[in-house]
């Protein structure tokens, strides 16, 4: 009897200790809850992607007439400082809009095909004009100074996208890109090693 009086409380205490040391595991989320969470995340990603695409498409629409004006003014021997200023302002505005989208989960490259396509078209259009016109180096530097941050900001939203843009540029645009003297852009796109011989001849390296 005396033994049972001691052993019974001891067993009870040991049981409590085991219960404390081994808490009950949290139940796994229900499949429906997981699916709802995934759908919500995909919806947010889709909205983010639509916003990015809208910004770059808007930039393309703005840049096209500016470049046409630049070509016309250069051909007529007119001062193009103001037109370059318009181009710089358009790119800066797009960068600011992209920056306002930050803070969310970065998007995957697999969903960025449309964005990559539009940005390649923008770069091809810009260097196709700047690389074939006689534009002062200080004006080209202004474009380089804003196009670089645009690409960097875009890459913060879609990590790795600048590599896809660089590798997606058509070969015919590489020499105009070098002649445009957009050295920071060339570096961001991972094309420095390819274009360094031309940049060296231009005295930019």
Image: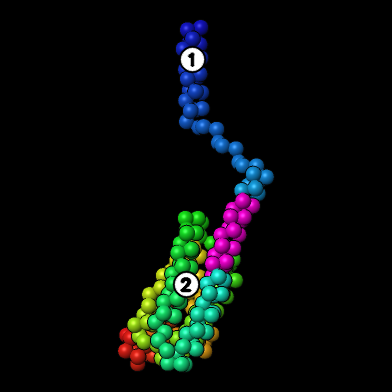
Label at residue 90: 2
Q: Name the side, left or right, on which 150 lies relative to 29.
A: left
Mark 2, secondary structure of its residue: helix
Seen in the picture, residue 113 relative to 196 is either above or below; the reply is above
Q: Nearer the viewer, residue 2 or 29?
A: 29
Name the image quarter holding residue 192: bottom left
Please name the predominant secondary structure of the magenta segment in the image: helix
Q: Nearer the viewer, residue 121 or 15?
A: 121
Q: Nearer the viewer, mark 1 or mark 2?
A: 2
The image's mark for residue 9 is: 1
Residue 157 lies in magenta, yes or no? no
Would you say 38 lies left or right of 138 here? Answer: right
Mark 1 element type: helix
Q: Is residue 51 visible?
A: yes
Q: Residue 83, percent across and down?
A: 44, 80
Over which residues does the magenta segment extend? 39-56
Of 146 and 190, nearer the camera is 146
Q: Looking at the picture, how far across and down is residue 84, in whole percent?
A: 42, 80
Q: Image quarter for residue 80?
A: bottom left
Q: Is residue 159 visible?
A: no
At x 64%, y 44%, the residue is: 33
Residue 157, position in %: x, y? 49, 63
> First in sequence: mark 1 or mark 2?
1
Front residue of 194/118: it is 118
Task: Give the spatial CA distance, label 1 vs label 2.
Answer: 80 Å
């Amino acid at each position: 009897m005396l033994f049972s009086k001691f052993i019974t409380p001891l067993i009870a205490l040991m049981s409590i200790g085991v219960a404390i040391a081994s808490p009950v595991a949290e139940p796994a989320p229900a499949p429906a809850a997981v699916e709802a969470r995934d759908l919500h995340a995909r919806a947010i990603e889709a909205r983010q992607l639509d916003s990015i695409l809208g910004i770059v498409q808007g930039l393309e629409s703005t840049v096209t007439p500016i470049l046409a004006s630049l070509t016309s003014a250069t051909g007529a021997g007119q001062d193009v400082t103001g037109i370059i200023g318009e181009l710089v302002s358009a790119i800066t505005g797009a960068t600011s809009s992209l920056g306002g989208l930050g803070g969310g989960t970065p998007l995957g490259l697999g969903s960025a095909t449309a964005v990559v396509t539009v940005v390649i078209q923008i770069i091809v259009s810009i260097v196709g004009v700047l690389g074939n016109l006689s534009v002062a180096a200080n004006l080209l530097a202004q474009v380089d100074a804003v196009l670089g941050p645009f690409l960097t900001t875009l890459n913060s939203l879609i990590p790795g996208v600048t590599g896809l843009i660089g590798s997606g540029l058509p070969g015919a645009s590489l020499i105009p890109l070098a002649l445009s003297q957009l050295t920071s852009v060339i570096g961001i796109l991972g094309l420095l090693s390819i274009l360094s011989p031309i940049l060296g001849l231009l005295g930019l390296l």
